[in-house]
Image: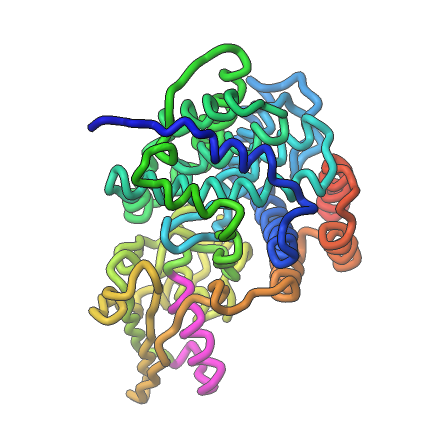
C-alpha cells in the first residue's frame, strides 16, 4: 500500500491553536464533567493492585523527579509518573468510553496529560484545554486505526496517540515536532488484542500503561532527535476526520460508567437490579437467570474470579454481585470480596445467550435483557436495556457528581468529596499540582 501522507499540518494546527476561551460552552462543561470522572477513576485506581505494581516499578526505575502522582506522596520523574498513573486510570474499569472505537479514550491519555501538567506546573484551565484536544484527536486516530487495520485495537493502541497529543500540547512542542511525535506514537502503538483479554482476564486489560508509555516516549524521543514520517490521519481517506476538528466535538458523545466492570456487563446488571427492586424478589429465591445479550458480551469470562481483573472482565461475577448486593462498585470487585459465597452460588444460576436482535445492533448499541425464574417457577422478564450513562442519556454534572460521591465513599470523607468537586467544577485558575496535593491529602487522611 502507498502511504501518501498529506503534510498540511491541520491536526497540529488544531492542537496548537485551540484555546479554552474559544471553545463552545457545552464543550467546556463536558470537559469539566470528563475531568471529574477521570479523577474519580484515578482515585479508585490508586486503591488497586495494578497501581501498586506500576508505582513500585516506577519508584525503582523512574525516581528522582518532582512530578506528582494521584494516590501517593512520592514524587517521580516524568516517565515514572506516566507509568504509575497509567496503571491506575483503568484499574477498576470505571472510566469513560466511546462506542465506535469500543474502548476508553479518557483513560488512554489521562496519565500522560496529568503527569505533563504537573511537570510543567500548569493551571487547571490549561489542563482542561488539552483534555478536549486529546479526546478530539485521540478518538479520530482510533477510528482511523480501526478502519485501516480492520482489527479491534483497543484502548492502549490509540492511547499512544492521545498521550502524545496531550503531552505535546502541555510541554510545548512546535508544529513539526508534534507531527513527528504523533508519527512515532502511532507507529509504535501496542496491538492490545482486546477480545483476548476479554476471554482471558488479567492486568493486560486494555493495554493502557503501554499505550501511555509509547506516547510519552514518542514525545521525549522527538525532543532528543528521533524521527518518524506520517500517521494515518494524514492519509486522504481519513481527511473527513480531520476536516471536522474544531467543528464537531466528539467529546460530547462519550458514555460514562456507573459500575466497576466491563461496559458489556452493565446492561444485565441494571436489568437485574431493576427486576429485583420492581418485583420485590429476594435473591435467595432465584432458581435460574437467563441473560440475552450480544456475542461479544457473551464471550466475556465466566470463571469464578481470583483477582480483581478476573472479576471486572467477567460477565457472570458482576451480574451475580448485582443480584445479591444491588450494586457493583469497588467493594464488589476487590480481591477481598471474591470469596463471597452468596455471589459464587448465584454465578451457577446464570446462563448467557446471544440474542440475534441484540447482536445486529452492536456496536452502535449495546443491549441486553434478563429473565429471572424463582423457586416457585414464576418468570420475570425485563425490558431491553441499554447500558446507563450513554451520551443519549444527556449525562450532566449532577450525574457525574453522584457517581463520584458514591464510588469514592470509604476512600474520601463526605466533606472532602464536596471540597474536591467544588474545585474541579469551579476553580479553573488553580494549579494542577494543588489539585493533586489536595486529593492525596484527603486519600491519606481517610486511609
Residue 21, x across and y down, in percent: 70, 46
What secondary structure characterizes most of the magenta part?
Answer: helix
Position of the N terminus, as image quadrant, is top left
Q: Residue at x 35, y 54 (%)?
A: 304
Q: Looking at the image, can residue 361 be seen?
A: yes
Give the image quarter of residue 315: bottom left
Camera-nearest residue between 303 and 367: 367
Relative to 60, say whether 208 is above or below: below
Residue 267, x across and y down, in percent: 39, 67
Residue 397, x across and y down, in percent: 64, 62
Residue 1 within the segment the image draws in magenta: no
Query: Residue lying furthest top in this view?
Result: 225
Residue 105, x across and y down, in percent: 47, 45
Residue 284 within the segment the image draws in magenta: yes
What's drawn in magenta, residue-wise? 265-285
Horizontal side of residue 22 vs 253, given as left or right: right
Query: Residue lying furthest front in this view?
Result: 8
Camera-nearest residue between 3 and 360: 3
Horizontal side of residue 388 vs 36, given as left or right: left
Q: Looking at the image, can residue 53 be seen?
A: no
Q: Residue at x 45, y 28 (%)?
A: 182
Relative to 257, say whether 350 is above or below: below
Q: Looking at the image, what colour scheme do you see?
A: rainbow
Relative to 10, say whether 383 is above or below: below
Q: Residue at x 67, y 34 (%)?
A: 72
Give the image quarter of residue 438: top right
Relative to 310, say whether 58 is above or below: above
Camera-nearest residue between 388 and 243: 243
Amino acid at each position: 500500500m502507498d502511504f501518501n501522507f498529506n503534510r498540511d499540518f491541520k491536526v497540529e494546527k488544531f492542537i496548537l491553536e485551540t484555546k479554552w476561551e474559544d471553545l463552545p460552552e457545552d464543550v467546556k462543561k463536558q470537559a469539566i464533567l470528563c475531568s471529574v470522572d477521570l479523577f474519580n477513576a484515578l482515585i479508585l485506581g490508586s486503591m488497586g493492585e495494578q497501581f501498586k505494581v506500576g508505582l513500585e516499578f516506577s519508584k525503582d526505575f523512574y525516581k528522582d523527579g518532582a512530578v506528582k502522582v494521584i494516590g501517593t506522596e512520592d514524587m517521580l520523574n516524568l516517565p515514572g509518573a506516566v507509568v504509575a498513573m497509567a496503571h491506575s486510570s483503568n484499574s477498576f474499569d470505571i472510566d469513560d468510553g466511546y462506542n465506535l472505537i469500543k474502548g476508553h479514550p479518557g483513560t488512554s491519555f489521562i496519565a500522560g496529560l496529568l503527569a505533563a501538567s504537573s511537570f510543567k506546573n500548569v493551571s487547571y484551565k490549561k489542563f482542561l484545554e488539552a483534555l478536549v484536544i486529546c479526546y478530539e484527536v485521540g478518538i479520530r486516530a482510533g477510528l482511523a486505526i480501526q478502519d485501516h487495520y480492520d482489527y479491534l485495537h483497543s484502548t492502549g493502541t490509540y492511547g499512544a496517540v492521545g498521550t502524545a497529543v496531550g503531552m505535546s500540547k502541555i510541554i510545548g512542542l512546535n508544529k513539526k515536532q508534534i507531527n513527528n511525535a504523533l508519527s512515532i506514537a502511532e507507529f509504535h502503538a501496542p496491538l492490545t488484542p482486546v477480545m483476548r483479554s476479554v476471554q482471558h482476564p488479567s492486568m493486560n486489560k486494555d493495554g493502557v500503561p503501554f499505550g501511555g508509555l509509547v506516547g510519552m516516549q514518542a514525545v521525549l524521543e522527538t525532543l532528543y532527535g528521533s524521527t518518524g514520517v506520517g500517521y494515518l490521519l494524514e492519509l486522504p481517506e481519513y481527511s473527513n476526520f480531520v476536516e471536522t476538528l474544531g467543528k464537531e466535538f466528539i467529546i460530547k458523545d462519550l458514555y460514562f460508567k456507573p459500575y466497576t466492570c466491563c461496559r458489556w456487563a452493565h446492561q444485565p446488571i441494571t436489568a437485574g437490579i431493576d427486576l429485583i427492586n420492581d418485583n420485590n424478589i429476594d435473591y435467595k429465591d432465584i432458581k435460574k437467570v437467563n441473560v440475552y445479550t450480544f456475542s461479544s458480551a457473551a464471550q466475556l469470562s465466566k470463571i469464578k474470579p481470583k483477582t480483581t481483573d478476573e472479576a471486572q472482565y467477567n460477565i457472570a461475577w458482576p451480574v451475580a454481585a448485582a443480584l445479591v448486593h444491588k450494586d457493583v462498585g469497588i467493594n464488589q470487585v476487590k480481591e477481598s470480596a471474591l470469596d463471597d459465597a452468596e455471589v459464587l452460588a448465584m454465578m451457577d444460576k446464570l446462563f448467557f445467550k446471544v440474542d440475534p436482535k441484540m447482536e445486529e445492533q452492536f456496536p452502535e448499541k449495546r443491549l441486553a435483557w434478563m429473565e429471572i425464574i424463582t423457586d416457585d417457577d414464576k418468570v420475570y422478564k425485563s425490558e431491553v436495556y441499554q447500558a446507563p450513562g450513554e451520551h443519549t442519556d444527556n449525562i450532566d454534572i449532577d450525574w457525574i457528581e453522584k457517581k463520584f460521591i458514591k464510588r469514592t465513599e470509604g476512600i474520601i470523607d463526605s466533606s472532602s468529596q464536596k471540597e474536591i468537586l467544588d474545585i474541579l467544577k469551579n476553580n479553573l485558575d488553580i494549579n494542577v499540582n494543588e489539585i493533586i496535593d489536595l486529593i492525596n491529602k484527603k486519600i491519606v487522611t481517610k486511609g
